[in-house]
Image (cartoon, rainbow, N blue to C red):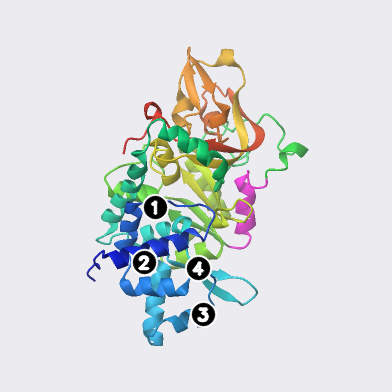
């Protein structure tokens, strides 16, 4: 089907839709021009009309059916496409009660649309626009605007995701390697970390047969643009839970996996350098966990955008890293290469950890060849200001 033209009325309606999608979760996505163009190239006029009539609230199956003049067969195909594109998602509230709601921009529409576009003509253009989206914000990375941005956003931003760990007893490729933790994980003060250990999440959802794995859409986008992951992560690396995960898997975007396979994936990506970003429903850390995104800092949307100096981030963290014995450090720099937030620097052949930038991901402790870094319980929200140009690690 030929793409509609971006007329002023269509542009206004697309912006209205994106603003409504922004109300569906706690994370606010700035409606910049590249994002408008991403929606423009993937939505038809009749789909846009339908979604604007649907509004932001939950809709019963009867309510959504009444919006469209199509016959039953035509409507089913139309509505199925909206679901596959990630523009709408299904919610199950009271027993037997199904509702439909407009999806969030991310996590939601963007991820589903990337899966939907695989192999389609507009896949590359969509990924190019996504890359342009972060380049758009990078243009504002200069002083004093960068400093003003941090001053304003620090108190306003809410952490949309947390950082998880595999239980230290869960070994990877090296049977002797584990993340050292400087306090007993069963002590009273460490019991306040309900989602800090991923093994519990896997057990909980695995018992309900509700674990699915999906290809990482960020790495897929990089691959489409001719870029490769420096950490060589496996393609199937994003783990999701619950009804939405099952729905996306039913479209062929992913597949159901066992608890053992989920733990195996987490081990592999941990060994390669991934940060386990714990994603909550509606990006609200008070709500249930819906996914574990295994992020590398060079191509995954959350951490890449930070490492290219485009945006600040805020994480809910449960640990911080510290050097056990400064005299034992040889300054090899391995810990710094794996640190996703540039919290580690090498000075006078010694590693130095900036606790204010540490998100407690455990990669430095896990990768340290001297086993000289440990994690200590330290629950806090960490605000990461946009990197200065001299600190940027990702250029495109």
Could you say which disc has been placed on residue 103 in the image? none
Q: Earlier in the sequence, mark 2 or mark 4?
A: 2
Q: Earlier in the sequence, mark 4 or mark 3?
A: 4
**Residue at the location (31% across, 72% down)?**
45
How far separated are the C-alphas under marks 2 and 4? 14 Å
Horizontal and vertical percent position of residue 263: 55, 48
Q: Which residues are magenta?
A: 194-209
Q: Nearer the viewer, mark 2 or mark 4?
A: 2
Residue 196 lies in the magenta stretch:
yes
Q: Earlier in the sequence, mark 2 or mark 1?
A: 2
Residue denoted by label 4: 56
Horizontal and vertical percent position of residue 319: 62, 35
Give the answer, above or below, for where 143 lies relative to 213: above
Q: Earlier in the sequence, mark 3 or mark 2?
A: 2
Could you say which disc has been placed on residue 13 in the image? 2
Residue denoted by label 1: 217
How many marks on residues?
A: 4
Q: Quick one: 269 or 49, which is closer to the camera?
A: 49
Which image quarter is the N terminus in?
A: bottom left
**Residue at the location (62% across, 47% down)?**
199
Query: Label 3: how many residues lie within 10 Å, few (<14), some (14-19) or many (20+)?
Result: few
Q: Earlier in the sequence, mark 4 or mark 1?
A: 4
């Amino acid at each position: 089907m030929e793409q509609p033209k971006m007329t002023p009325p269509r542009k206004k309606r697309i912006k209205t839709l994106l603003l409504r999608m922004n109300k569906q979760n706690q994370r606010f996505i700035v409606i910049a021009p590249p994002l408008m163009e991403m929606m423009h190239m993937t939505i038809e006029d009749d789909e846009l009309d339908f979604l604007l009539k649907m509004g932001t609230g939950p809709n019963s199956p009867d309510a959504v059916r009444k919006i469209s003049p199509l016959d039953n067969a035509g409507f089913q195909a139309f509505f199925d496409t909206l679901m596959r594109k990630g523009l709408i998602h299904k919610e199950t509230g009271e027993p037997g009660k199904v509702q439909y709601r407009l999806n969030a921009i991310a996590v939601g529409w963007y991820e589903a649309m990337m899966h939907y576009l695989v192999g389609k003509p507009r896949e590359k253009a969509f990924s190019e626009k996504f890359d342009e989206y972060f380049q758009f914000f990078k243009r504002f990375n200069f002083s004093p605007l960068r400093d003003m941005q941090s001053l304003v956003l620090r108190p306003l931003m809410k952490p949309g995701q947390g950082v998880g760990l595999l239980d230290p007893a869960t070994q990877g490729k090296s049977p002797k390697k584990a993340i050292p933790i400087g306090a007993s994980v069963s002590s009273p003060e460490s019991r306040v970390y309900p989602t800090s250990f991923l093994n519990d999440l896997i057990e909980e959802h695995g018992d309900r047969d509700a674990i699915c794995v999906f290809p990482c859409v960020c790495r897929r986008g990089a691959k489409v643009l001719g870029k490769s992951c420096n950490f060589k992560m496996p393609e199937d690396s994003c783990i999701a839970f619950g009804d939405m995960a099952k729905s996306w898997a039913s479209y062929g975007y992913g597949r159901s996996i066992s608890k053992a396979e989920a733990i195996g994936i987490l081990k592999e990506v941990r060994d390669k350098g991934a940060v386990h970003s714990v994603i909550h429903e509606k990006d609200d850390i008070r709500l249930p966990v819906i996914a574990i995104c295994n992020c590398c800092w060079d191509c995954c949307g959350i951490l890449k955008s930070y490492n290219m100096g485009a945006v600040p981030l805020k994480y809910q963290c449960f640990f911080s890293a510290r050097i056990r014995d400064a005299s034992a450090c040889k300054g090899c720099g391995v810990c710094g290469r794996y640190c996703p937030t540039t919290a580690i620097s090498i000075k006078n052949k010694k590693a130095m950890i900036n606790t204010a930038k540490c998100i407690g991901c455990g990669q430095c402790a896990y990768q340290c060849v001297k086993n000289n870094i440990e994690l200590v319980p330290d629950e806090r929200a960490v605000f990461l200001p946009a990197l200065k140009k001299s600190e940027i690690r990702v250029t495109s």
